[in-house]
C-alpha cells in the first residue's frame, strides 16, 4: 500500500470521527466511487487510484491537497471552515430518526464480509432490511435467518437473529449464543470453555440430537453474538 493511500485512509478515519461521513457507502457516495472499491482500500487490498484522490480533494475542500499527495504540512487547511461542514452533515438526533434505522438482512455466509471493528456489508449481500427500534437500541448490526434445527427449540428454521460483531475474542459470555464463520462453514452455537485448553471452545446445540464438539479458536474467522430474535409465524 503506497503512502498516498495510507493518507487517504487517514482522511477517511478523520471524516468518520468528525461525523461528516458514517459508513464506507456514505464515503463512496461523497467522492463518486463504488462502495466495493472503498471496502477493498480499507482492507488494504488495493491502492487509492487517481479518481478517488481527485474527487476527495474536490469534494472536501478543507483537506490540504499538498499533504494528501506529498505528506507535507497538515491534513486540514489552516484557513478551512470545517465547522460548517460538520454542522451541515450532522443531523439533529431524535428517537424517531434512530428508530428508522434499517438493519440489513444478509445470508449467514456473508459474515465473511464483516470487517473487524466496523461493519462492511456489500450491497450484493443484502437480501432485505428491517426497521426494528429494539434491535437498533441493542447495537444490532445485521440480521441473519436461521436454517436447520440445531438450535431448536430456542430457535426455529426461519427465525431472524439480530447480531452484533465481536472484536475482542479474549472474552466470551459463556452459555450465550454466537454466530461463527469458521473453516467448517458458518454455524450458530452456544459457546463454553474447555477445561485446561484455552485454545479451544466447546460448541453446543440446544437440540439434543446434535452432540457438543470442540473447535479451535484459530479456525474461527468472524464471530458475532446474538442479541435478539424475531420469530415469524
Image: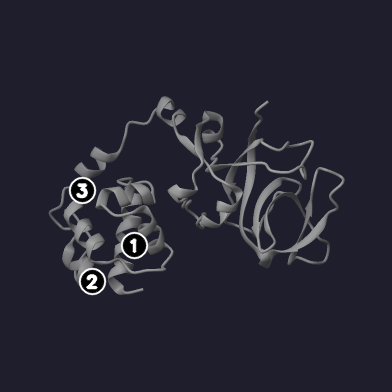
Residue designated by label 2: 71
Q: Please tell me whether mark 2 sits on a helix, a strand or a loop.
A: loop
Task: Please state, as top left, top right, bottom left or bottom right, where the C terminus lies in the image.
Answer: top right
Residue designated by label 3: 82
**Where residue 99 appears, x then y in whole percent?**
46, 28
Q: Please tell me whether mark 1 sits on a helix, a strand or a loop.
A: helix
**Label 2 close to label 3 by CB (< 8 Å):** no
Q: For this view, does 121 lie left or right of residue 155?
A: left
Marks 2 and 1, how far apart at CA? 13 Å
**Where residue 34 appears, x then y in whole percent?**
33, 54
**Where residue 27 appears, x then y in whole percent?**
32, 51
Residue designated by label 1: 9
Which residue occupies the foreground of this view, 214 or 192? 214
Number of callouts? 3
Marks 2 and 3, how far apart at CA? 20 Å
- Mark 2, mark 1: which one is toward the viewer? 1
Task: Please state, as top left, top right, bottom left or bottom right, where the N terminus lies in the image.
Answer: bottom left
Give the mark nearer the N terminus: 2 vs 3. Answer: 2
Residue at screen point 64% across, 47% down:
225
Location of residue 183 (image quadrant): bottom right
Residue at screen point 45% across, 34% down:
101
Characterize the local packing of mark 1: few (<14), some (14-19) or many (20 or more) Cα atoms within 10 angstroms: some
Residue at screen point 38% across, 48% down:
23
Q: For this view, does 199 lie left or right of residue 166?
A: right
| Residue 163 higher or lower than 7, as above or below | above
**Where residue 166 appears, x then y in whole percent?**
59, 52
**Label 1 close to label 3 by CB (< 8 Å):** no
Amino acid at each position: 500500500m503506497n503512502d498516498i493511500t495510507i493518507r487517504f485512509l487517514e482522511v477517511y478515519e478523520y471524516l468518520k470521527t468528525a461525523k461528516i461521513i458514517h459508513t464506507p457507502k456514505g464515503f463512496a457516495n461523497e467522492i463518486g466511487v463504488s462502495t466495493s472499491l472503498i471496502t477493498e482500500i480499507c482492507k488494504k487490498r488495493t491502492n487509492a487510484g487517481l479518481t478517488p484522490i481527485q474527487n476527495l480533494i474536490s469534494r472536501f475542500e478543507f483537506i490540504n491537497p499538498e499533504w494528501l499527495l506529498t505528506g507535507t504540512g497538515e491534513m486540514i487547511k489552516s484557513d478551512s471552515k470545517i465547522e460548517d461542514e460538520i454542522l451541515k452533515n450532522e443531523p439533529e438526533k431524535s428517537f424517531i430518526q434512530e428508530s428508522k434505522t434499517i438493519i440489513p438482512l444478509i445470508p449467514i455466509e456473508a459474515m465473511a464480509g464483516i470487517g473487524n471493528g466496523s461493519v462492511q456489508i456489500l450491497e450484493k449481500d443484502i437480501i432485505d432490511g428491517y426497521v426494528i427500534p429494539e434491535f437498533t437500541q441493542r447495537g444490532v448490526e445485521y440480521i441473519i435467518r436461521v436454517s436447520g434445527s440445531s438450535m431448536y427449540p430456542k430457535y426455529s428454521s426461519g427465525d431472524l437473529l439480530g447480531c452484533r460483531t465481536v472484536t475482542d475474542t479474549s472474552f466470551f459470555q459463556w452459555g450465550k449464543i454466537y454466530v461463527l464463520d469458521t473453516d467448517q462453514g458458518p454455524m450458530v452455537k452456544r459457546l463454553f470453555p474447555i477445561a485446561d485448553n484455552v485454545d479451544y471452545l466447546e460448541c453446543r446445540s440446544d437440540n439434543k440430537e446434535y452432540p457438543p464438539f470442540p473447535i479451535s479458536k484459530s479456525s474461527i474467522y468472524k464471530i458475532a453474538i446474538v442479541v435478539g430474535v424475531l420469530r415469524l409465524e
